[in-house]
Amino acid sequence: MPEVLMRLSLYWNPSAGDRIPLDEITRAITRAGHVVAGILQSDADAADALRGHVDALVAAGGDGTVARAARSIFGAALPIAILPLGTANNIATSLGINDDPFAAIAEWGRQSVVRIDVGIVTDDVGDRLFIEGVGTGLVPRGINRGQGAARQHESASAEVEWAREMFLGALSELATQPSRLRIDGEDVSGDYLLVEVLNIASVGPRLRLSAETTPADGLLSVVTASEVDRGAIRVHLERPSDDRRDHAWLKSWRARHVEVSGWHEYHVDDEVHVSASGELAIAIRPSCLAVLA
C-alpha cells in the first residue's frame, strides 16, 4: 500500500470561482498521496473536522470559505490547507500559496505548519473574528453594489474584473465621511473615503491597499484614504487585477489596537454590517491559526 501523507477533511464550497467538480478535486488529492476522510459542505460547521482523526482541514473555495473555516477552528491545533477556488483568493495570495488549485494540492506534502494572526472586532452585537480586514467607506459600498447587480461570468478572473467595475462605480458616487479614529492611542480622526484595518494586504476584488501587511507579525495595518487619494484608488482599480506589484500606496499605520466611531456601515471580511452606535474596537490575536504554507 502506498504511504498516506495526510488524512484530510474537505470543507468544500461547490459554487466558488470556476466551479471545479468535486470528483476532480478528490482525484487530485488522492494522486498527491492524501486521503479525503470526510467532506463537509460549506453550509456545515467546519468545526466538525475537529472531532475526526484528520491531519488538516482543507478549505476549498474562495476567501469567504477560508474565513468561515478559520473562524470555526480558531485557536485549535488542527491546521487549514487552503485550496484556492474563489475569485480574488486574497488570503491564499497573502500566504504565498499557488493560485492554481491543482498546483496548490501538489505542494501540501512539502509545506509546513505556520501560525498566523486573526483579527477581532467588537461592536454593538459582540465579537467577530476576521482574516482579511474590517473597514468603512468604499469597501462595504462596493460589496453592496455588487450584491445588487446581475452577475454571470465565464471565469473567476472575469468575476474579479466585474467586481472592480462595481467598486469603480461605488467610488464615483462616494463622499468622504467623518471617522473618529484612534490607533494605539493616537488620534488620527478625519474625513475619509475609506478606512481599512487589515490583517492581509488586499481585500475585496484584489484591492491592494498596503504593501507592508503580513498575517504573521502580530500587527494590523490601518489604511486611510481622503479626497486627495480618490484618483490613486481609481487608477489602481483600472489596472489589471493580476499585477501583484501594483498597490494603491495609501497612508498607513501599524497597530495592535484600533478604536473607531462613526462607522454605521462597515464590513468584516466579505460581509457588510450595520451598527446603531457606530463604535467599534479592533484588535489582533497573534499566532492563533495554524495554516499549511
Image (cartoon, helix red, strand yellow):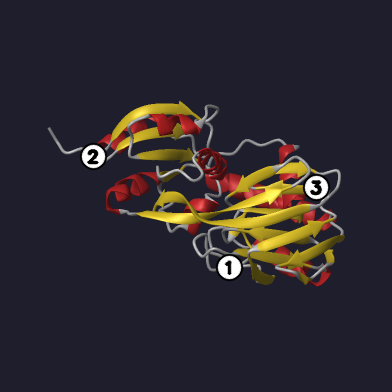
Earlier-in-chain disc, 3 versus 2:
2
Which-is-in-front pick, marks 1 and 2? 2
**What residue do we see at 65% from left, 57% from top?**
283
Give the Cα separation between the discs numbered 1 and 2: 37 Å
In the depicted structure, whether residue 96 falls above or below residue 12? below
Residue 168 visible in image: no
Amino acid identity at mark 1: Asp
Earlier-in-chain disc, 1 versus 2:
2
**Most foreground residue, 110 or 234:** 110
Circles 3 and 2: CB atoms closer than 8 Å:
no
Q: Which residue is mark 2?
A: 33
Amino acid identity at mark 2: Gly
Badge 2 crowding class, 10 Å Cα cut-off, few under 14, some 14 to 19, many 20 or more, is: some
Q: Which residue is mark 3?
A: 265
Amino acid identity at mark 3: Glu
- Residue 187 quadrant: bottom right
Badge 3 crowding class, 10 Å Cα cut-off, few under 14, some 14 to 19, many 20 or more, is: some
Horizontal and vertical percent position of residue 4: 21, 38
**What residue do we see at 69% from left, 55% from top?**
282
Which-is-in-front pick, marks 3 and 2? 3
Q: Which residue is mark 1?
A: 246
**Most foreground residue, 44 or 218:** 218
Give the Cα separation between the discs numbered 1 and 3: 28 Å
**196 horizontally vs 214: left or right:** right
